[in-house]
Image (tube, grey):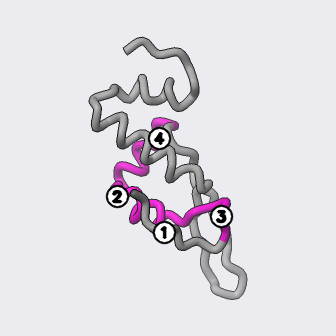
Amino acid sequence: MPEELNVATEDRIEVKELLRLSGMSRTQLRNWVQRELLPRPCRCSSPGLGGSSSYYPAGALDRAWIIQRLRSHGVPMRHIRAILNSEKVEL
């Protein structure tokens, strides 16, 4: 199952960790965010480090695993969106 999560807080996950732990590509991540299957990242500046990082809510990893599992069973994206939004779906 999932590898250990290496983030500073339990409520967010860095993009690189989300990609590593979920096994998805950056393109796939962008696609799922565009389709509103995953939340948009939040950009956080790093004081003193001169940069910023993008973070997703920690729950994004669970959603990514759910999406991947449903896709592996041939569930269409429109149904996945409905399932994630707890809407009634006829399969």
Q: Which mark is residue 10?
A: 3
Quadrant containing the N terminus is: bottom left
In three-dimensional space, the C-alpha distance between marks 3 and 1, rounded to whole angstroms, equals: 12 Å
Mark 2 element type? loop
Ranked by sequence position, the earlier of labels 3 and 1 is 1
Instruction: State the quadrant of the C terminus.
Output: top left
Q: Vertically, is 62 above or below 87? A: below
Residue 49 x/y as whole percent: 64, 86
Q: Which residue is drawn at 53% across and 73% down?
A: 6
For numbered disc 1, what is the local secondary structure?
loop
Q: How far apart are marks 2 and 4 (CA)?
A: 18 Å
Tell me which amino acid carries mark 4.
Answer: Gln
Q: Nearer the viewer, residue 3 or 51?
A: 3
- Mark 3 crowd level (few <14, some 14–19, many ≥20, 10 Å Cα): few
* Nearer the observer, 48 or 55: 55
Residue 4 sits above or below residue 71 on the image: below
Q: Which of marks 3 and 2 is nearer the N terminus?
A: 3
Q: Reading the chain from its start, which is encountered first: label 1 or label 4?
A: 1
Identity of the residue furthest to the bottom in this view: 48
Residue 53 percent across, percent down from the top left: 58, 70
- Provide the residue designation for mark 4: 34
Q: Mark 1 points at which residue?
A: 4
Q: How far from the left and from the top, in percent, is residue 22?
A: 40, 56
Mark number displayed over residue 64: none
